[in-house]
Image (tube, helix red, strand yellow):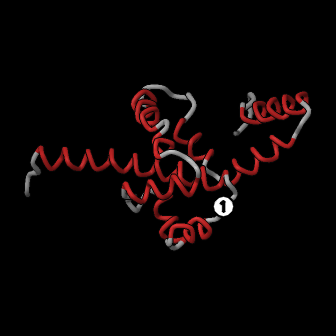
Amino acid sequence: MVKQSHVAAGRRASMRGDRRIDIHVGSRLRFRRRLLGMSQRQLGERLGLSNQQIQKHEKGTAIISAGRLFELAQALGVTVQFFFEDAAAVDRHQSAARGCAGGPDLHAMIEFLGSRDSSELNRAFVAITRPGTRRAIVGLARSLATPSKGSMN
């Protein structure tokens, strides 16, 4: 049996941390692309990439170079910093959430914000002009999200 060195163990831990950042940057990329109503193919065409490459960047499985990140930011009309917004909060929340059951899952919220459902929900909600209707929808969502006594949700 071969013992691993502390250096190797630290390197693997560091790589896991880097992967979380890659996943976060990818989710921000997907969020912005979907917010603009742009397909992976359309973004790829702007940058000379395949939609599979865009998909890998969005999943965090392909590392994005600094130059590519700059090109993505320009194509999506944001700053490079946009991709790193809330990255520290995700890490802090994961540390804090280990001891807190029942709190909001920040990672799940960020994942949802990058989803197609979120984009469609936001577009539809913004199209609603009556404040009372908006409040009623928020109330409905809260009531559906809060499990009632005896509920199996």
Image spot of residue 7 (x, y percent): 12, 46
Write down the residue under mark 1.
Answer: 38
**Residue 96 versus residue 37: which sits nearer the camera?**
37
The location of residue 103, given as percent across then percent down, is 55, 28
Say which residue appears at 46% left-offset and 49% top-offset. Answer: 25
Task: Give the total number of marks visible in the rendering.
Answer: 1
Q: Residue at x 47, y 64 (%)?
A: 56
In the rendered view, does 30 fall on the left or right side of 84?
Answer: right
Q: Nearer the viewer, residue 60 or 102?
A: 60
Quadrant position of residue 95: top left
Left or right, 114 with respect to 88, comes to: right
In the image, residue 99 lies at what x, y percent?
43, 26
Disc 1 residue crowd, few under 14, some 14–19, many 20+, Cα 10 Å: few
Please name the amino acid that badge 1 sits on.
Met
Q: Secondary structure at mark 1?
A: loop
Q: Is residue 64 above or below residue 100?
A: below
